[in-house]
Image: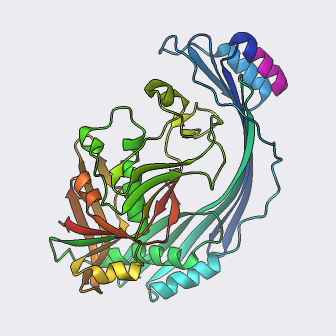
Amino acid sequence: MSEISLERRLEAAAPGAWELYRKEGSSRETWRAGRERFDSFRRETGVAARWWDPAPRFAAAGSPEALSRAMGLASEPAVGPASPPAWPTGTSAAEDLPEFESPPELAEELGRLVAAESRGEATLSALTLRRGVTLERVVNARGLDVAWKSEATTGVAEAVGRRGSRSCEARAVFRWDAAGDLTGLARRLSDRATLPLSDRASPIDRGEWLLDVSVTAALLAGIAPLFVRDDPPPWALRADVLQPDLSLVDDATPDAPFDGEGTRSRRVVLVENGIRRGELHDLASAGRSGASPTGHGVRRSYRTPPTRSPRRLFLESIRPRPQRDLLATVRRGLFAAALTTPLLCDLENDRYEAEFTGVVVVAGRAQGPVAAARSRGRISELLRRIAAIAPEQEFLPSPYPIGGTAALVERATFL
């Protein structure tokens, strides 16, 4: 069965109230560990349909023929009758899935950088690089027919740090849209592998807190649900979310021109100059709230319906400051180089807790490593105490890209 036949069947079953999605993706992956090497190639194709008759239904399969069978088995969900969303319209030129090269050979160079950054105390144990390209297309009952291509290189680097009889395993995930920052990756991996080898606890109980790019990204991932909920907790509705020169933005336009529902991507300012301004909407949430969709209907897989989600979240500053200036500002505090456990964000009760390895900083100079420090407090206070960020952004997968940047928290409590 062709996709045109599927469109006709959907129109007959749900006149004016259907959507057809197709995804075709391929990737090349290289794993290196010492002299061992493994290369793989993956290709996946999937199609999915949503329609209302009058309750919403969804079906997905690996081919149009299989989707036709799945549509006959799709049961009516428990939500009952519901109105279909206000479908987007428009067209764009279709593309072919291009051929692409294998991931670059970076293991040897990264291994040398890790050894240099750690002064020989850490070695690269494995590197996985994956280069993928995806072609997506959405067609709906209102005449929408858009297609777009996206590409990315992602990976996982692993290292082992050793000091005397002690050792520590570490890993770092990364995402590169263009040329990768190997030096930054080596520095982050070295810190994660060697800083825990210290048995020193935090010598201070409060002070400035300088966050590494990965820690800032984890914080943004933790608070992201506040902007995709119909009922955020009261504390998150305060006007002053950040300090006046900071903004929180979601802008997926560099990655793809449309979201998974065919709505055009656009820049959405969630917090502008410290003040909460907006939310993220897919078609369904926009219909419930009476707002306009913002292009944030995200498909984690063709096998599941699109859901409301951030797509490319990051901080901006009117007056960014180089990381060396942020470090020089620290009179007595800690640099959080890496989280040792996932950041805990209790959004309902406005609480966070972070456990991290890092470095003691006094008068802008490193004074030695800290193996396991903790900070806890109110998320709202932590956000308002972010005094400055660096201009450089590194987008990490989480699972959508989140822009990590060095950030200075003017006051924090340590345990």
Left or right, residue 200 beside residue 402:
left
Q: Magenta stretch: residue 295 in it?
A: no
Relative to 224, residue 83 above or below: above
Pick whichever, 377 or 186, lies toward us. Answer: 377
Q: Position of residue 127 (x, y in %)?
A: 59, 69
Above or below — where is 384 with respect to 411? above
User: Residue at left 45%, top 78%?
Assistant: 190
Residue at 43%, 41% (x, y): give it: 279
Q: Is residue 118 visible?
A: yes
Q: Nearer the viewer, residue 68 or 350?
A: 350
Residue 157 image point, x, y percent: 54, 68
Q: Quadrant of the N terminus?
A: top right
Q: Which residues are magenta?
A: 1-9
Residue 227, percent from left and from top:
40, 42
| Residue at 31% from the left image edge and 84% from the top image edge | 328
| Res. 347 in view | no
Could you say which quadrant of the image residue 229 lies in? top left
- Left or right: 241 with respect to 22? left
Chief secondary structure of the magenta portion: helix
* 365 horizontally vs 188: left or right: left
Q: Residue 415: percent from the left, percent from the top?
A: 17, 65
135 is higher (above) or lower (below) than 142: below
Q: Residue at x 23, y 46 (%)?
A: 350
